[in-house]
Amino acid sequence: MVNWNDPSVLFNDYLALIKLDHVIAGIYIWETVFTVGFELDVLRGKRPYKWTIWVSHRDYGLSPPPESN
């Protein structure tokens, strides 16, 4: 049985969490860097507006919250 209060187990769990955080942050930064040019072209009017660009922003929490009635 694993002793979840053992300092070495806690330390290994902590390291796993840190690695997971770095992977998720890397994916977020990768996506942002490689789509910023497209998004700026849409905002400048060089490309047609499509609703899909704002769906991805909603997933990132960058869009404003919906209006309440």
Image: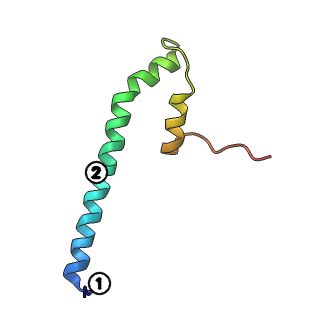
The residue positioned farthest toward the left in the image shown:
8
Give how far apart the Cα atoms at labels 1 and 2 are: 25 Å
Q: Which residue is mark 1?
A: 4
Residue 47 appears at what percent x and percent y?
A: 49, 14
Q: Which disc number belongs to residue 23?
A: 2
Q: Residue at x 29, y 57 (%)?
A: 20
Which of the two labelled residues, at mark 1 and mark 2, occupies the earlier sequence position?
1
Amino acid type for the residue under numbered disc 2: Val
Q: For residue 54, what is the image quadrant?
A: top right
Q: Residue at x 25, y 58 (%)?
A: 19
Pointer 1: residues within 10 angstroms few (<14), some, or many (20+)?
few
Residue 7 appears at what percent x and percent y?
A: 22, 83
Q: Label 1, secondary structure: give it.
A: loop
Q: Which disc number belongs to residue 49?
A: none
Amino acid type for the residue under numbered disc 1: Trp
Q: Give left or right: position of 61 versus 6.
A: right
